[in-house]
Amino acid sequence: MSVNIHFLGHAGFVLTAGKHTVVIDPFITGNPRCKAHVQDINATHIVLTHGHGDHFGNTIEIAERTGAIVLTVNEIAEYLGEKGLTKLEPMNPGGRVDTGFGYVALTQAFHSSSYDGRYMGMPAGAIIHLAGKTFYHTGDTGIFSDMKLIGEIYKPDVAMICAGDRFTMGPELAARAAEMIKPKIAIPIHFGTFGLLADEDTVRRGFKPDGVEVKLMKPGETFDLG
Ligand code: NI
Ligand code: MN
């Protein structure tokens, strides 16, 4: 079965395969480059990498409307529980949870994580195994050499790699990361959304990993992974 990959913009994706729709980091309201409307987002599962507003985004309202299961770091799951959500899978980096479509595992990320003035546990990256395909979303992170190990363990088909600099890796380090992860396709993310981040031209010029196909997606763009 093929997986349809839709880029919401920034770090947000919607992955669809058959009856399963996995939404990652749905930052829609307040995202100047996102073309989607919150009420149009369908989800059976939401994967949230960390608590920052540009990732947490519209998680609560999408989960409330769709009844999606939210898979996220323990402290964020506790917070979502206090907000009334009940379909929660608390996790932490290193752990894996089996799902109706495959599994979700969290990886480490070197970053910070807070929301609503509260500590939100460790930030994470996410591995999503859906319809026989494996995705590695780095979350927000600096570079770390265990990305090579993550690549060896999970063998991702697609890696979504933060490349906007300042808060995460910039394009050159993101390219080094892609060379360690060795996915079939690398999609740079977390750039161009705000003035503080590297723009698209900078990422296009700087994100050139050796031996890895790069797919630079525009917000709203979709492709099928067969
Ligand atoms: Ni962040
Ligand atoms: Mn971010």
Image (spheres, rainbow, N blue to C red):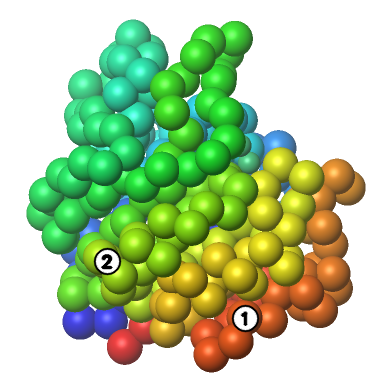
- Check disc 2 and report the residue beneath it: 154
Residue depicted at 73% across the width and 66% down the height: 171
Quick check: is the Cβ at mark 1 less than 8 Å away from ligand 2?
no
Amino acid bearing label 1: Pro
SS under mark 2: helix
Q: Quadrant of residue 101?
A: bottom left
Where's residue 212, x and y in %? 53, 85
Task: Work out whether residue 182 or residue 225 is closer to the camera in this orientation and state it.
Answer: 182
Q: Is residue 51 above or below residue 180?
A: above
Q: Is residue 151 left or right of residue 10?
A: left
Amino acid bearing label 2: Tyr
Q: Is residue 130 left or right of residue 61?
A: left
Res. 97 in view: yes
SS under mark 1: loop
Where's residue 137, x and y in %? 45, 57
Q: Which mark is residue 64?
A: none
Q: Quadrant of residue 133?
A: bottom left
- Check disc 1 and report the residue beneath it: 209
Q: Quadrant of the C terminus?
A: bottom left
Quick check: is the Cβ at mark 2 less than 8 Å away from ligand 1?
no
Residue depicted at 24% across the width and 28% down the height: 90
**Structural crowding at the residue carrying mark 2, measured as other residues with C-alpha within 10 Å and reported as few (<14), some (14–19) or many (≥20):** some
Where's residue 97, x and y in %? 16, 44
Q: Quadrant of the N terminus?
A: bottom left
For the residues labelled 2 and 1, the Cα–Cα distance comes to: 19 Å
Among the two numbered marks 2 and 1 on one chain, the one whose residue lies closer to the N terminus: 2
Residue depicted at 43% across the width and 48% down the height: 125
**Structural crowding at the residue carrying mark 1, measured as other residues with C-alpha within 10 Å and reported as few (<14), some (14–19) or many (≥20):** many
The quarter of the picture showing ligand 2: top right
Where's residue 13, x and y in %? 48, 58
Residue depicted at 25% across the width and 65% down the height: 153
